[in-house]
């Protein structure tokens, strides 16, 4: 599989989940958020939240930064735009 295809597959798989879409909406509304605040907002288990956030991060939808023991997440609009532009060039 070509790396470009893998990037698209990861990206669209990350978007193909209702909980992850809701996390994206929450990050869009609030900007940067502490992982535990996201977890508490949706009443998700820590492991489930971590899985969703890692999937969004690996897909290029979200980014993270550490501050001490806390991990903060935010959307990565430059990465999303880049992937969507590549995909647009592929299909149009």
Image (cartoon, helix red, strand yellow):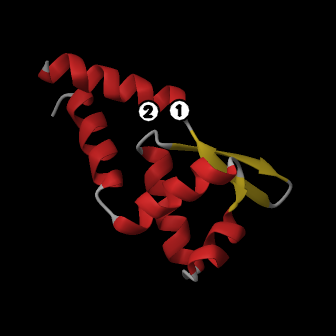
Which residue occupies the extreme front position in the image?
29
Q: Position of residue 71 (x, y in %)?
A: 72, 56
Q: Residue at x 29, y 21 (%)?
A: 86
Which circle marks residue 4 in the picture?
A: none
| Residue holding disc 2 | 80
Asked if residue 63 is positioned above or below residue 15 in the image, the reply reads: above
Q: Position of residue 83 (x, y in %)?
A: 36, 28
Q: Position of residue 20 (x, y in %)?
A: 43, 61
Q: Secondary structure at mark 2?
A: helix
Give the position of the C terminus as an image quadrant: top left
Asked if residue 44 is positioned above or below residue 92 in the image, the reply reads: below
Q: Residue at x 47, y 63 (%)?
A: 22
Q: Is residue 40 left or right of residue 60?
A: right
Between the C-alphas of marks 2 and 1, the distance is 5 Å
Q: Secondary structure at mark 1?
A: helix
Number of other residues with Cα within 10 Å of mark 2, as a class: few under 14, some 14 to 19, many 20 or more: some
Is label 2 in contact with label 1 (beta carbons under 8 Å)? yes
Q: What is the tally of numbered marks visible in this picture? A: 2
Number of other residues with Cα within 10 Å of mark 1, as a class: few under 14, some 14 to 19, many 20 or more: some
| Residue holding disc 1 | 77
- Seen from the viewer's position, the closer of residues 4 and 86 is 86
Q: Position of residue 30 (x, y in %)?
A: 68, 53
Asked if residue 65 is positioned above or below residue 8 in the image, the reply reads: below
Which residue occupies the extreme right position in the image?
68
């Amino acid at each position: 599989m070509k790396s470009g295809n893998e990037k698209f597959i990861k990206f669209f798989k990350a978007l193909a989940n209702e909980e992850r879409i809701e996390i994206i909406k929450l990050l869009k509304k609030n900007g940067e958020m502490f992982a535990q605040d996201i977890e508490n907002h949706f009443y998700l288990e820590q492991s489930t939240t971590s899985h969703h956030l890692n999937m969004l991060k690996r897909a290029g939808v979200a980014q993270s930064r550490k501050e001490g023991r806390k991990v903060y997440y935010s959307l990565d609009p430059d990465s999303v735009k880049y992937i969507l532009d590549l995909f647009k060039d592929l299909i149009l």
